Image (cartoon, rainbow, N blue to C red):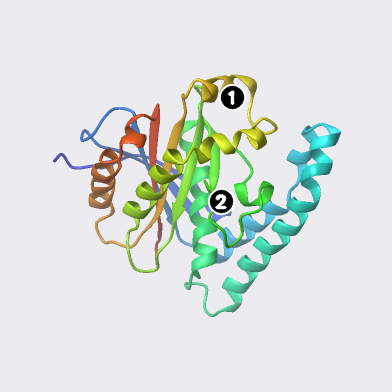
Amino acid sequence: MANASYSGEYSKPEWGCSFHQVSSTYGPKNIHLCHVKVSDIIKIAAELSSIVMNDSWIMNLDKGARRAYETTVKETAECLVDIFKNNLRSGTDDKVSTEFGEVMVSMSSSRALEVILGHISLPIAELWKPQKKQNEGFDFHTVCPNKFINFGEAKFSGSGNPHGLASSQAHDFFESKKHLRDRVHLINLAGKESLDHLDTDSFGAILAFSINSKNPLTIFENAITTAESHTSLKNAKYVYIVGVSHEY
């Protein structure tokens, strides 16, 4: 198995993290790798809070869609901000709760794909569909430059590298057609060309997970192997594997 390597770095001090493109000759060409290195939990919590409280995207919707979403968005945004605040109240700034960790993995992975690969980050799914403490489907979505909607599944662990859980959960969701259930919402959030692609079963997958390893590049290669074992992921136009680590 060929070794993976870093091929690009994008520093985002306002986020308290940096985004890294990872290259590997192992695996199919439609798999792309990114690594988010978080160095400042306080800064990224503040940035995530600002994003979820920014409801300007609702203003781009028609009146009916705005009325349908505004109450859900307000309530969920407040819940998410409480999660961010509670994480920081729990102790020192190097502690990450599971609830905060899962949102951090989702949103920082979406942002990494935006910065590194030119994706459009859509509002986190928890804002526009009721799924708190439920298993309603994919955690986040992006639209890539080729106008495919990418469905993201995020997993967090304080000690492990749950790429297997992210892959298997994403596979199960695709098999259960949960990506198609999101269409009724994505019609308001993604462009027509992206929806046309989805309607012809052309879409991408994002597997996002926390990394707790001194050898993150090895974790990425293991994640490629894991993703390749799931038929539904082989059928995706693109597979994006994003690891998020907390650098002490």
Q: How far across and down, in percent of the image, does residue 108 sit? A: 51, 50
Q: Give the camera-side residue of 199 and 194.
A: 199
Q: Alpha-carbon distance for marks 1 and 2?
A: 20 Å
- Outermost residue on the left side: it is 1
Q: How far across and down, in percent of the image, does residue 158 sit? A: 40, 68
Q: Give the camera-side residue of 17 and 73.
A: 73
Q: In this image, 11 relative to 65: left or right?
A: left
Query: Label for residue 136?
Result: 2
Q: Residue beneath label 1, please?
A: 195
Q: Give the camera-side residue of 60 and 136.
A: 136
Residue type pointed to by label 1: Leu
Q: How many marks?
A: 2
- Outermost residue on the bottom side: it is 91
Residue type pointed to by label 2: Glu
Q: How far across and down, in percent of the image, does residue 90 sit? A: 56, 79
Task: Tell me what residue is drawn at x 30 percent, y 40 percent.
Answer: 230
